[in-house]
Image: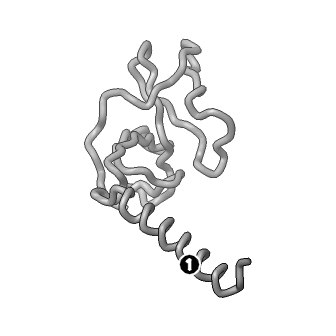
Amino acid sequence: MLTSRKVGFLTTLCLLTGGAIVLFTTDRSASHDGRTFVYLCAETGELVAGPPWDTPAVNEETGRPTLFRARYCDRCCRWYPTRPSSMQTGNPLAARCPKHETILVADGPLPPINEDE
């Protein structure tokens, strides 16, 4: 029969084990886990590469939240903005090029990387 003392001990043991698993299996080598995203400024058209940010992110040059994540069309050789983080619905991989109707991809030529924020 399990007493409240045994239940408490088993609960504590499970929590400690789970915490240890998370602690020792999580890679903390980089603050943004090495991923680089491309952002397009809705105001200036400038491309910026950087770590994951919630969008719209603040453009350092304008001081306004005008940076949106961008996806690349292999046929146009052009980056297109995507919806803000708060408005993302459905599969983000299904974004299509407005000109060619091809699926936009996250990989493409990177602009200079901005590590700020």
Return the x and y of residue 112 as percentages of the image width and height.
26, 42
106 is higher (above) or lower (below) than 27: above
Name the residue: 43% across, 38% down: 45
Q: Amino acid at mark 1?
A: Thr
Q: Work out which quarter of the rendered image holds the C terminus and state it.
A: bottom left
| Farthest front residue in view | 1
Q: Give the total of numbered labels.
A: 1
Return the x and y of residue 18 as percentages of the image width and height.
50, 65
* Secondary element at image label 1: helix
* Lateral position of residue 93 relative to residue 58, left or right: right
Name the residue: 54% across, 15% down: 102
Return the x and y of residue 8 as percentages of the image width and height.
63, 82
Return the x and y of residue 100 as percentages of the image width and height.
54, 12
Name the residue: 35% across, 27% down: 108
Camera-nearest residue between 41 and 18: 18
| Farthest right residue in view | 1
91 is higher (above) or lower (below) than 56: above
| Farthest bottom residue in view | 5
Q: Work out which quarter of the rendered image holds the N terminus and state it.
A: bottom right
Name the residue: 58% across, 20% down: 98
**Label 1, on which residue?**
12
* Lateral position of residue 8 relative to residue 36, left or right: right
